[in-house]
Amino acid sequence: MMAERNREVGDIDVMSHDWSGLAEMDVKGLYMNMDGILPDAADKFSSVNGINSNGYAYAYWGNQTGIAYDPAKVDEANLPQTPADFAAFWVANPNMFGFNYENGGSGPSFYENTLRNLSDADFTSGTSSPEKIAKLDAGIKFFNDHASHYIITASNTDSLTRLSDGELSMVAAWEDHLAGLQRKGEVRKDLKFYIPKMGMNGGGNNVSIPKNAKNKAAALVFINWLTSADVQTGFNKQFGSAPMNRKADDSAALVRADQRENRVGEAINPFRADMEEYFIEKVILAR
């Protein structure tokens, strides 16, 4: 799309990418504004995690990280909600909690939001410096102090497989990933999922219409269908994605609607990349 942006007529009618990417793009220069022409726009999402597209893009797929757990081993009334709660759970249940640091974003969401809660670094700014990274040290110490109490898994899928097999009782996970594996019978259907009050990353994908799209009217019809309440309800039932229409039925979701208030946006690069590198160096390689 970027290569075609200066052509009078491009080859792309509808563009989709991660919502967080909008923060680093010239949306006004690239996309057509759909305000006033997309039907039922008030029911749809043009702002996610504090990134407002101002009508240039709409969300059609919502994803959410959180904690998957085995209800046979973990009491739903006492689910860990804060870093201190997780530390207490680790001590009481050593090596029964797992998260990955690579091959998927669920584990990084867990440790990054733990670091966020234990520091005063500004996670809403992508600005990075040695001084800002140093503010994460209290969180780094937290993980190192409890290094013998949790398990590092190989990936998102490895975490859920080991949870389903009974090796672990809680893991960091993606909501839609868990729902998909349950639907295919690859993990147990009784596993549950929640978003802790300390917050974990959520977001999604968007659709937009390039300014030089050849078939703008057809693109608008498609986006209206894709973001409709019926389709968003179907996505939730079939794939476990978070509905991106306020009138969609989310009764099949793994997460209660009130827990979605605990969703936070991911940290912004280059700070995020520097933080992940620092965590791997100071925590993972130090194990």
Image: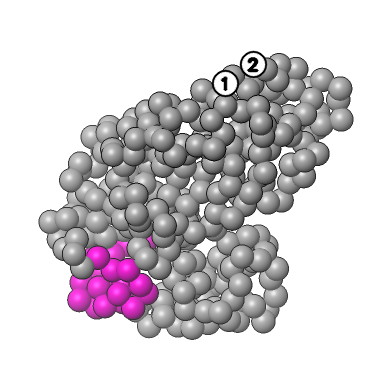
Q: Judge whether 258 appears above or below 84 on screen.
A: above
Determine which of the numbered discs, if any, sits on residue 12 in the image. Answer: none
| Image position of 31 (left or right of 123) | right
Residue 103 in percent (x, y) is at 47, 51
Q: Residue at x 79, y 25 (%)?
A: 212
Residue 259 sits above or below residue 204 on the image: below
Residue 156, percent from left and from top: 39, 50
Q: CA distance from mark 2 to mark 1?
A: 6 Å
Frontmost residue, 99 versus 284: 99
Q: Residues within 10 Å of mark 2 (few under 14, many from 20)?
A: few
Task: Look at 56% across and 34% down and name the residue there.
Answer: 41
Q: Is residue 22 magenta?
A: no
Give the residues in magenta.
79-101
The residue where tag 1 is placed is 222
Residue 147 appears at what percent x and percent y? 36, 76
**Label 1 Cα crowd, 10 Å radius (few <14 / some 14-19 / many 20+):** some
* Residue 15 visible (yes or no): no
Q: In the structure shown, which secondary structural element does the residue marked by tag 1 occupy?
A: helix
Residue type at the position of mark 1: Phe
* Residue at mark 2: 218
Amino acid type, callout 2: Ala
Tell me if label 2 and label 1 are in contact, CB under 8 Å.
Answer: yes
Q: Secondary structure at mark 2?
A: helix
Q: Nearer the viewer, residue 124 or 141?
A: 124
Q: Residue furthest left?
A: 72
Dividing the picture into quarters, in which one does residue 154 lie? bottom left
Where is residue 64 drawn, in percent x and y? 43, 49
